[in-house]
Amino acid sequence: MTRDEGTGATGVDPRELWLAPDRPRRGRRPAFSREAITVAAVALADAEGIDAVTMRRVAAEVGAGVMSLYSYAPDKETLLDLMIDHVNGELATHAPLTGDWRADLKGIGHLQRDHMLRHPWLATAVPARRTLGPRTLAFLEHALAALRPSGLDGGARLEVFAQLTAFVAGHVAHEVAQAEAAQDPGRATAEALYLATVAADGHHPELAEALASAGRPVTPDATFARFLNRLVDGLDAD
């Protein structure tokens, strides 16, 4: 396994990563910053997907030797943490809260979805790690404050936010995949015909009833809103 592939876990102490000044972990200070590295990596991920982000590609984008990047991020996992926290700075953390925790939580869910659609690589990157950077923690603080009127204790509020984030990430990943599949109309038509045939065979009565039921709005926005409402409205506030 190469250094660039990583192992799925970062060995960088979060205090060193997030509390230390923006400077190389060793060696002389090069002519670029950790911020510049992170911005270049985010631009690559947004344009070409997360698989395009390698230390070699990022080094080329900032005009540096690849080995010099390791003084800022020893592996791709650390770089991903930097990227996630960087884009999380786009999330509003000072929006006024209504005091209606369910309404506020739904608003946070919509905000997260919009954010992940702007950066589709987030939907798969976020569930795979626990990023503890300052921008991420600022948004977590906002979400926990939104949940305070629920009466849940701090641990339960953390669980609810984790549950919401996992739901949004999974939904966006599915949404992005569906959008890509829709680019092949022939495939969609074939799947519809197949389901119609199976539903009519008499062996799948539940499926037949579901397919024959009154249609609901199927736009991405409407579908997400329905799913989010079911999740949040069903949360237990004990």
Image (cartoon, rainbow, N blue to C red):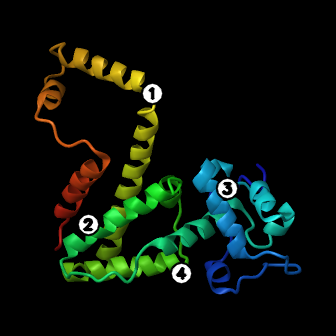
The amino acid sitting under disc 2 is Lys
Image point (72%, 52%), residue name: 5
- Above or below 97: residue 129: above
Q: Relative to the observer, which residue lies in front, 13 or 83? A: 83
Q: Relative to the observer, which residue lies in front, 197 or 176? A: 176
Q: Nearer the viewer, mark 4 or mark 1?
A: 1
Q: How much space separates mark 4 and mark 3, taking CA atoms?
A: 24 Å
Image point (78%, 65%), residue name: 62
Q: Residue 211 in the image: state x and y as whole percent.
A: 17, 28
Q: Circle 3 is placed at which residue position?
A: 7
Tell me the element at label 2.
helix
Q: Residue 21 in the image: state x and y as whole percent.
A: 70, 86
Q: Of label 4 and label 1, which has the lower sequence position?
A: 4
The amino acid sitting under disc 1 is Asp
Q: Nearer the viewer, mark 4 or mark 3?
A: 4
Q: Circle 4 is placed at which residue position?
A: 134
Q: Is residue 199 visible?
A: yes
The amino acid sitting under disc 4 is Pro
Q: How much space separates mark 1 and mark 3, taking CA atoms?
A: 35 Å
Q: How much space separates mark 2 and mark 3, taking CA atoms?
A: 35 Å
Tell me the element at label 1.
loop
Q: Which disc number belongs to residue 184?
A: 1
Q: Which disc number belongs to residue 106?
A: 2
Instruction: Bin the neighbour count of mark 2 within 10 Å (Cα to Cα): few under 14, some 14-19, many 20 and up.
Output: some
Q: How much space separates mark 4 and mark 1, taking CA atoms?
A: 41 Å
Q: Of label 2 and label 1, which has the lower sequence position?
A: 2
Q: Is residue 9 visible?
A: no
